[in-house]
């Protein structure tokens, strides 16, 4: 598999190199040189397969012969050891539940697959430092995926006071090879620090720097697989009129969905659903890229005003000669998010802010005869405080959260200054 750097098309790397590097020159994202496509008959046959076998075929189409089919399937089996069920909400809307993994969020798929790929690619004596920023769920998924892995040190930056207490407990109580830093700033400040680190060649070499954000190609490709799993669970008549609404912050999940469509998965259209951090919806409506300052919302994992993956979306549309105006979009404020959560509860479906946003935009834009799917990206209990307050009901904690809820936080605190982060990375 060859990938090219979106900011420097002359830089081309293998899948293994892209996984280990994370970012290319000038902080450029890697993107597949070849965009594979399955025949319609192949798609129908694949939809009959089990999740792991089908996912191995999808990933092999991108990765090529860099990993043997047997090894790839074994690694996928280790990574995707939990289901992604479709739960009916109304007669024409369902939720793809992606929160049945160990950290109760969709990031488990990408985080665990990346960990499997890195352990396969890296030499036994090769030291790796995973540096990543999180707006909530990435941190936990990456921390648990790499926890206890030899020769891998994980450093996770997150905005202090801007993720839910239970999200924080899930990954800031592990210790060992997992180090967490609460940054006095927003998610964009955390992300900017990660980018500065990757621009520092001496630092990269000294600590074997890598990133596990959704910018890493292995995480992105893993997410393609659950879109196929969703369609596999639908009857034929619903597959033909499928609209998928994706709660969007850094836009990795939407990118993965569009790559699934590029492979030939029958999706009529996608909808990008954001909160008040609506850079992309405004861009699609007005044609101007004008990021505002990031604002804190109920759906904190989507509090991103400069989404990293958007260049990949534009590149895919350009390569496929699709029209950006065919991409659905919508932004939902906190008041409407609350109302949507209550509406879902009245329908008998318990949800949290991120999924509720995707549901709301889907509900408003679904046309007659279409079937709608929105992504449930995190378990409602990860946002226990806000969900309980909005729905006026008590949520029991799943075991994964209950066992960490009372543990002490092990996080360091830091101002959003690169010199401080650099010193920390070199001196630990």
Image (cartoon, rainbow, N blue to C red):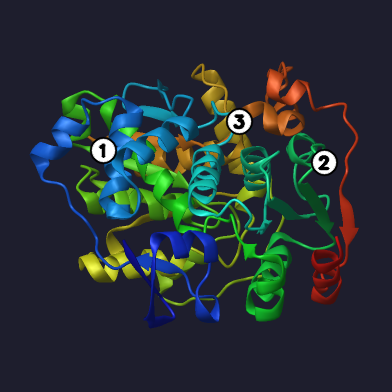
Label of residue 102 in the image: none
Q: Where is mark 3, residue-wise?
A: 104
Label of residue 175 in the image: 2
| 424 w.r.t. 231: above or below | below
Q: Nearer the viewer, mark 2 or mark 1?
A: 2
Q: Is residue 49 left or right of residue 66?
A: left
121 and 233: which one is in front?
121
Picture quarter with the N terminus:
bottom left
Q: Specify few, some or many for label 3: CA neighbours under 10 Å numbering under 14, 14-19, or 20 or more.
A: many
Q: Residue at x 69, y 32 (%)?
A: 382
Q: Where is mark 1, residue-wise?
A: 242
Q: Disc 3 vs disc 1: Cβ atoms closer than 8 Å?
A: no
Q: Look at the numbered disc 2 and give the secondary structure of its residue.
A: loop
The image position of residue 403, as x and y in percent, is 78, 22
The image position of residue 409, as x and y in percent, is 88, 40
| 253 w.r.t. 426: above or below | above
Q: Is residue 18 left or right of residue 157?
A: left
Give the mark, 2 or 1, whose residue is nearer the N terminus.
2
Q: Specify few, some or many for label 1: CA neighbours under 10 Å numbering under 14, 14-19, or 20 or more.
A: many
The image position of residue 121, as x and y in percent, is 48, 53
Q: Nearer the viewer, mark 3 or mark 1?
A: 3
Picture quarter with the C terminus:
bottom right
The image position of residue 335, as x and y in percent, is 64, 43
> On the image, which quarter does residue 239 sit in?
top left
Q: Is residue 328 left or right of residue 101?
A: left
| 253 w.r.t. 92: above or below | below
């Amino acid at each position: 598999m060859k990938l090219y750097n979106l900011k420097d098309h002359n830089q081309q790397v293998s899948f293994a190199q892209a996984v280990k590097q994370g970012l290319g020159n000038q902080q450029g994202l890697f993107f597949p040189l070849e965009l594979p496509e399955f025949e319609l008959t192949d798609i129908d046959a694949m939809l009959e397969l089990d999740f792991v076998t089908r996912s191995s075929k999808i990933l092999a189409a991108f990765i090529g012969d860099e990993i043997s089919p047997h090894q790839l399937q074994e690694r996928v089996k280790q990574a995707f050891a939990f289901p992604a069920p479709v739960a009916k909400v109304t007669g024409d809307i369902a939720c793809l539940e992606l929160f049945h993994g160990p950290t109760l969020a969709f990031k488990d798929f990408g985080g665990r697959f990346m960990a499997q790929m890195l352990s396969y690619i890296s030499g036994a004596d090769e030291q790796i430092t995973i540096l990543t920023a999180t707006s909530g769920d990435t941190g936990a998924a990456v921390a648990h995926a790499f926890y206890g892995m030899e020769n891998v040190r994980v450093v996770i930056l997150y905005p202090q006071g801007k993720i839910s207490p239970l999200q924080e407990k899930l990954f800031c109580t592990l210790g060992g090879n997992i180090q967490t830093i609460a940054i006095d700033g927003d998610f964009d400040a955390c992300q900017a620090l990660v980018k500065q680190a990757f621009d520092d060649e001496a630092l990269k070499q000294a600590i074997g720097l890598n990133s596990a954000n959704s910018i890493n190609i292995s995480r992105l490709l893993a997410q393609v697989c659950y879109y196929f799993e969703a369609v596999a669970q639908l009857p034929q008549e619903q597959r033909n009129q499928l609209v998928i609404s994706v709660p969007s912050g850094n836009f990795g999940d939407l990118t993965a969905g569009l790559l699934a469509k590029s492979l030939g998965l029958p999706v009529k259209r996608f909808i990008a659903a954001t909160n008040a951090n609506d850079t992309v919806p405004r861009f699609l409506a007005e044609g101007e890229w004008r990021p505002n300052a990031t604002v804190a919302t109920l759906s904190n994992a989507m509090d991103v005003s400069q989404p990293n993956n958007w260049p990949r979306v534009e590149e895919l549309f350009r390569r496929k000669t699709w029209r950006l105006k065919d991409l659905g979009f919508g932004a939902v404020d906190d008041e409407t998010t609350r109302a949507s959560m209550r509406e879902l509860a009245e329908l008998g479906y318990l949800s949290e802010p991120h999924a509720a946003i995707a549901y709301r935009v889907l509900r408003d834009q679904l046309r007659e005869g279409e079937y709608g799917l929105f992504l449930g990206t995190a378990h409602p209990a990860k946002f226990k405080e806000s969900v309980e307050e909005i729905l006026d009901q008590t949520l029991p904690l799943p075991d994964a959260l209950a066992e960490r809820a009372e543990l002490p936080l092990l996080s360091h605190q830091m101002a959003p200054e690169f010199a401080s982060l650099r010193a920390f990375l070199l001196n630990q």
